[in-house]
């Protein structure tokens, strides 16, 4: 330790250097400063400098060990430390602080009497933000503290602004998602008409310029439409709100044919869209009684009709909306018998990875759709999205909308009895929401954390000791959704929990195309001797053996689900395959018979 040299200027405010642009101390005076030095003289001297220049919130530590403890308890905004100290050196202090997420951005100013290039490299490699030479010059020390505080406050301000923008963008995305047909509305339409839907909507940025809708015309006809506004992001998203408002007010209950309907939409957009902006749009009216489909297009990609296992283009054209008033749009009628399927899409499908070299121009797209005719309808959009992701791994350059509509033999019924927001039995016994009666064997499909919470209560009630298994069931279902279907890593969940952002992240991922259609399948089987629960997610699996063999962390905020299930809730816990299937068993007493529903 080398003593700190003092001059008379140490005890007078030197003021900012000419032309420095530094702010007056102002709000910086209350900043939390931690001074660590084993020299009592140095601590007293530097503390006096800080106090005489307006810093009122300073704590002192006599070595690196004490400094580390005070830092973790107090979370200073700037740390000033000596380098060579007993117990714990400044090098070790810097390294340990940087390993703590709470100190990733904290400025650490190291003071030292040695200034060799090798030492400076070692200091910065250890994690220091700045280095100041002894003897300490008051003006230099104060200027460096002020610069680091201003930088820290700027970073905090930018983070706050980013959080605010993220929250506002999330709110805007949620509002825009509400413009699209809700799962419940689609399911209701599928129950009322002989139709099945499968669709996918994916913005290339936070907000989309694509929008589509489906509505009833009468007891045997429905209308679907999709629109694509020029541009991306906020500007095009605002146009989707304009269009949605117009359709829900001025064109509500409009029963005219697709051509006249498009003409009215066009005149409206000519009035409200700025010069240079326009939209393409497709409108289709399906008549299930007559087994026909009427189509009109305003420059939209040509729809494709599948009949008898063959896909063909439905040739229909027209100029985009919002360019010229008074346009007449042609309308065609085509057969649409039972088994037929309409495919409508935005041009991102045929312009990825680029408009010049697309994966799918029309002939390859027809061939691909022919390949998918034997694939479950609900899986077809994801198959096409997967194809695009393979050639555009960094993401799409345009918003993507894919809509399949199939004319089925009977009213209602999706190819899978599942919904978003409700739990449904997918066994042959019933097609009703989960009941509280005792069951012997059933299968359930869930998607959200709310689904998992409801199913946990219903399943736990079937066990002799509901309280004992309830937590374990919840942890396994939550793991299947969070870590399995939504691919939230263990370290990501820890950070989200600390930031109180886990719920919002789950909701966000549930809305993303890559995760939206994933489900967790739960099989429940109760016999006279045992109750077996089998949970399967659609994720990539994980190294479950580490958690089964490792030390249980029952008191941890994260990573405890398997430990709880294994030690507290079930008599046996077995993972299958790659770890995305788990079987949990509770052994029953022979004296306790199994009751059937």
Image (cartoon, helix red, strand yellow):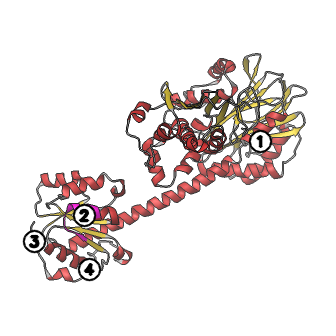
Say if mark 2 contacts mark 1, CB within 8 Å.
no
The correct choice, above or below, for 382 with respect to 51 in the image is above
**Spatial CA span between label 3 and label 4:** 19 Å
Quadrant where the image shows the N terminus: bottom left
Quadrant where the image shows the C terminus: top right
What element does badge 4 sit on?
A: helix
In the image, the segment drawn in magenta is: 60-69
Residue, disc 3: 3
What element does badge 1 sit on?
A: helix
Residue, disc 2: 67
- Across and down, in percent, residue 149 comes to 33, 67
- Across and down, in percent, residue 102 comes to 36, 57
Q: Who comes first in sequence, dot 1 or dot 3?
A: 3
Q: Who comes first in sequence, dot 2 or dot 1?
A: 2
The correct choice, above or below, for 206 with respect to 348 in the image is below
Mark 4 Cα-neighbour bin, 10 Å: few <14, some 14–19, many ≥20:
some
Residue, disc 4: 51
Residue, disc 1: 185
Residue 66 seen in the current view: yes
Mark 3 Cα-neighbour bin, 10 Å: few <14, some 14–19, many ≥20:
some
What element does badge 2 sit on?
A: helix
**Spatial CA span between label 2 and label 3:** 20 Å
Pick the residue in front: 264 or 68: 68
* Residue 288 counted in the magenta span: no
Relative placement, left or right, of 175 versus 28 is right
- Across and down, in percent, residue 587 comes to 56, 31
Comparing marks 2 and 3, which lies closer to the viewer?
2
**Spatial CA span between label 1 and label 4:** 67 Å
Pick the residue in front: 68 or 526: 526
**Spatial CA span between label 2 and label 4:** 20 Å
Comparing marks 2 and 1, which lies closer to the viewer?
2
């Amino acid at each position: 330790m080398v003593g700190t040299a003092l001059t008379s200027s140490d005890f007078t405010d030197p003021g900012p250097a000419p032309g420095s642009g530094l702010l007056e101390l102002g709000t910086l005076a209350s900043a939390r400063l931690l001074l660590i030095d084993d020299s009592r003289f140095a601590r007293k001297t530097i503390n006096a400098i800080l106090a005489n220049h307006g810093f009122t919130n300073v704590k002192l530590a006599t070595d690196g060990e004490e400094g580390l403890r005070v830092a973790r308890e107090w979370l200073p905004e700037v740390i000033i430390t000596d380098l060579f100290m007993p117990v714990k050196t400044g090098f070790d202090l810097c390294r340990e602080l940087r390993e703590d997420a709470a100190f990733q951005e904290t400025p650490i100013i190291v003071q030292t009497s040695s200034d060799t290039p090798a030492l400076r490299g070692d200091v910065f490699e250890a994690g220091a933000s700045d280095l100041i030479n002894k003897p300490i010059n008051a003006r230099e020390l104060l200027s460096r503290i002020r610069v680091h505080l201003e930088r820290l406050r700027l970073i905090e301000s930018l983070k706050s602004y980013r959080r605010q923008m993220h929250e506002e963008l999330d709110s805007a995305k949620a509002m825009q998602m509400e413009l699209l047909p809700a799962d419940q509305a689609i399911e209701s339409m599928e129950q009322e008409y002989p139709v099945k839907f499968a669709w996918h909507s994916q913005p290339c940025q936070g907000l989309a310029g694509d929008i589509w809708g489906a509505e009833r015309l009468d007891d045997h006809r429905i209308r679907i439409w999709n629109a694509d506004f020029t541009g991306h992001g906020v500007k095009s998203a605002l146009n989707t709100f304009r269009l949605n408002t117009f359709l829900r007010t001025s064109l509500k209950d409009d029963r005219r044919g697709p051509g006249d309907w498009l003409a009215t939409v066009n005149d409206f957009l000519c009035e409200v869209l700025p010069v240079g902006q326009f939209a393409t749009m497709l409108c289709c009216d399906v008549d299930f009684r007559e087994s026909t489909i009427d189509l009109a297009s305003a420059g939209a990609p040509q729809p494709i009709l599948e009949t008898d296992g063959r896909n063909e283009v439905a040739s229909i054209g027209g100029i985009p909306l919002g360019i010229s008033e008074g346009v007449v749009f042609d309308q065609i009628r085509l057969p649409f018998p039972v088994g037929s399927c309409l495919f409508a899409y935005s041009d991102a499908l045929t312009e990825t990875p680029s408009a010049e070299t697309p994966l799918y121009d029309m002939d390859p797209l027809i061939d691909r759709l022919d390949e998918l005719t034997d694939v479950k309808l609900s899986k077809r959009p994801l198959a096409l999205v997967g194809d695009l992701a393979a050639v555009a791994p960094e993401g799409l350059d345009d918003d993507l909308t894919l809509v399949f509509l199939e004319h089925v033999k009977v009213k209602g019924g999706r190819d899978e009895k599942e919904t978003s927001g409700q739990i449904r039995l997918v066994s042959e016994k019933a097609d009703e929401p989960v009941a509280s009666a005792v069951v012997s064997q059933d299968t359930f499909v869930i998607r959200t954390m709310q689904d998992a919470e409801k199913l946990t209560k219903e399943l736990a009630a079937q066990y002799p000791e509901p309280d004992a298994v309830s937590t374990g069931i919840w942890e396994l279902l939550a793991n299947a959704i969070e870590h399995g279907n939504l691919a939230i890593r263990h370290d990501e969940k820890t950070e989200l929990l600390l930031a109180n952002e886990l719920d919002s992240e789950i909701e966000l991922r549930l809305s993303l195309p890559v995760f939206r259609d994933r489900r967790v399948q739960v099989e429940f089987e109760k016999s006279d001797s045992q109750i077996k629960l089998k949970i399967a997610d659609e994720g990539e699996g994980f190294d479950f053996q580490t958690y089964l063999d490792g030390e249980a962390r029952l008191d941890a905020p994260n990573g405890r689900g398997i430990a709880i299930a294994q030690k507290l809730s079930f008599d046996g816990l077995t993972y299958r395959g790659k770890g995305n299937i788990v079987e949990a068993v509770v052994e029953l007493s022979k004296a306790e018979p199994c009751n059937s529903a």
